[in-house]
Image (spheres, grey):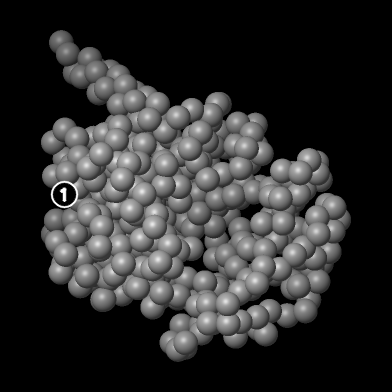
Amino acid sequence: MKSPICDMLGIDFPLVAFSHCRDVVVAVSRAGGFGVFGAARHSPETIHQELQWIDDHVDGKPYGLDVLIPENMATAGEKNVTWKSLESRVSQRHRDFTRDLLEKHGVKLTTADVAQDQPQPFDKERALAVLEAAFRHPIRLIANALGVPPTEMIDMGKQHGVPVAALVGAREHAVRQVTAGVDILVVQGTEAGGHCGEVSTMVVVPEVLKAIKGIRDVPVLAAGGIMTGRQMAACMAMGAAGVWTGSVWLATAEAETTEIFRDKMIEASSRDTVRSRGRTGKPARQLRSAWTEAWDRSPDSPGALPMPLQTLVSRDAFDAIDRAAAAGNPRARELVSYFVGQGVGLVDSVKSAGAVVQEFKEDFADAVEHMNALLAE
């Protein structure tokens, strides 16, 4: 396919798949797409182990890495912030609310031990160290969300000849990213799972393309609610060079998600997701659950803490929820949630990641054939 994304990433079909699961990354890349491994929870040591496994199984196909370095956090500008040092900033009210919520659903909250020097969630220096370690492997893309990548990250990409991608949800964000020097824009609509803005994919993609025209020629990957090859074709008809996908891979057999969450995905409609601050402190689209309802709608809710503090509240809680649900607690199932977009309503079964790539290709070809037929005399 003639797309600048194909040329930049060394692929034949411009379908980019973000996943925290190495098996999904490998399956997508081997099937002709481009897998991107989410590294937000990794250290330099663990990322080396994961990427080595990918290298051993991907048959030389290209893949990339995604980190999360927020431009704005409650701890911005502070040095040497650790998980332990942040714990004192979580109020007793927030702790009590979380414990009581879980107890109402028969879930016992347990706290995992954290090393004294473990960095804060989404720590910039740790993320840069992860990137340094990752360049020991043949990665073909590095990507960042939640703001302009730090200069060090952009410089790393240039040094290693690897494109740097950045996620945007509004045209003004795109202009800042292009000015900063990123190589690829991931233009994400509000339909997307995880952190997202308020403008739809159908609107924000052409807005961004118009805004950056004349500044610099930067290819755009459309993102947000894209679950089929027909949607991919529609985005490329608007001018995107390809698509960035995430939620569709959560319902694959290889995904990191639990069986219970995959079942809830199949049951859900497109109206069953919500943008909530209750998991990370920033608006993130996820499956509506008793957790999101309590944090967003309960009159007793203390309100979400700013990023990164809310992660200290939610991470242990969701580990406990998933364990209890897996053990057969039906009330815990009401709390089970994960980041997922409005496209969840299009999920009707669990498939292999390779099969999903093949369906994308077939649906894309059908859509193009349909459009060509409209032009035929």
Query: Which residue appears at 27% of the width and 66% of the height?
Result: 177
Where residue 122 appears, x then y in whole percent?
47, 71
13 vs 125, nearest the viewer: 125
Query: Which residue appears at 48% of the width and 63% of the height?
Result: 41
Query: Helix, strand or loop at disc 1?
Result: helix
181 vs 100, nearest the viewer: 100
Q: Residues within 10 Å of mark 1 (few under 14, many from 20)?
A: some
Image quarter in which the N terminus is found: top left
Q: Is residue 73 above or below residue 292?
A: below
Image quarter in which the C terminus is found: top left
Where residue 265 appears, x then y in whole percent?
60, 36
Where residue 180 appears, x then y in whole percent?
23, 71
Where residue 339 appears, x then y in whole percent?
55, 50
268 vs 260, nearest the viewer: 260
Count all numbered tags in the image, as a single digit: 1
Q: Is residue 204 left or right of residue 317?
A: left
Splitting the image into 4 quarters, where does residue 175 fall?
bottom left
Can residue 171 be seen from the camera position used here?
no
Query: Which residue appears at 53% of the width and 82% of the height?
Result: 117
Residue sitting at the far top: 377
Q: Is residue 329 above or below residue 43?
A: above
Can residue 219 be seen from the camera position used here?
yes
Query: Which residue appears at 55% of the width and 72% of the height?
Result: 307
The residue pinned by badge 1 equals 8
Residue type at numbered disc 1? Met
